[in-house]
Amino acid sequence: MLRIAVPNKGSLSEPASAMLHEAGYRQRKDRRELVLVDAGNEVEFFFLRPRDIAVYVGSGKLDIGITGRDLLLDSGADAEEILQLGFAGSTFRYATRPGTAKDVTDFGGMTIATSFSGLVGKHLADNGVDASVVRLDGAVETAIQLGVAEIIADVVETGTTLRNAGLEIIGEPILKSEAVVIRRTGAPQDDPKVRQFLRRMQGVLVARRYVMMDYDIRVEHVEKAVALTPGLESPTVSPLHHEGWVAVRSMVPSKDAQRIMDELYELGARAILTTGIHACRL
């Protein structure tokens, strides 16, 4: 049975469970459940603190897990990411009072406060900077005001919270993070249960990015139409009862669907329909 670690709370928890549900796996109904057996899919889910998941997977106690790239790298665990999941995106950056420093090379001898001491320590070492790192749990914006540190390193979305604290973002991003599937470094890559899990998750990712588009068009305009809707391999083109007309079916990116429908209509296509895709295998 495949043993999978899933975040039990925080910004990763609900999107991860929703994606697993879309992939056909049972998910817990009670947040107090710590272990859930999905016998039909031969999977056992363990609901753990997001920060601990990489440690469990890296130790080999669990086969794979879902966590953030930032948490994986911060843990220093013997684990690696094998699939990007496209949610919980964030950017990790440095911030300080204006005039304190311009980039990471100016941090020598300073103290950096962060909730990700492992990640920041490695970034400083990679840049040859000798600085102290203080680990704080939770918000770190007040660390400078209270004299704990000269610099902070934290997740930045709009930067509004930092500006309200009198701080400015400096230097290049330390890391761009998102939810990822991880496994123990060096684990066998041909495990059929892991491959099946990854195919299901990849199927959900594709289903979320594409819609199925159907339309009718005159034969003489088919080549121009299918150039707009090439599909993943090629579209399906079928003759209609009315001579000179064909029906076309193709997968198109959902973000472009409305534009493509407009262009098809101008080309002479009619009965243009889009439908959602619930699951797929490529």
Image (spheres, rainbow, N blue to C red):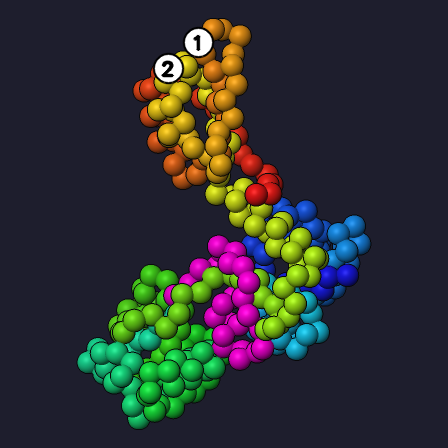
Q: Is residue 131 visible?
A: yes
Judge whether 249 appears above or below 8 on screen. above
Task: Say which residue label 2 marks.
Answer: 220
Dot label at residue 103: none
Kindly identify the residue that appears in the image at 65 percent across and 67 percent down.
Answer: 188
**Lower position in the chain sequence, tag 1 or tag 2:** 2
Give the camera-side residue of 229 and 260.
Answer: 229
Indicate the position of residue 36 as horizontal and vertical percent values: 75, 60
Q: Is residue 71 magenta?
A: yes
The reply to whether dot 1 and dot 2 touch (C-beta < 8 Å) is yes
Distance between the alpha carbons at the discs numbered 1 and 2: 8 Å
The answer to whether residue 237 is left or right of residue 25 is: left
Q: Which residues are magenta?
A: 68-91
Q: Secondary structure at mark 1?
A: loop
Figure quadrant of the C terminus:
top right
Q: Which residue is mark 1?
A: 244
Residue type at tag 1: Gly
Nearer to the camera, 152 or 249: 249
* Along the line of sight, the residue nearer the viewer: 95 or 219: 219
Whether residue 49 is visible, yes or no, is no
Residue found at x 52% / y 12%: 240
Q: Position of residue 73 (x, y in %)?
A: 49, 74
Q: Amino acid at mark 2?
A: Glu
Indicate whether 12 appears above or below 236: below
Q: Is residue 239 left or right of residue 269?
A: right
* Residue extending farthest left: 99
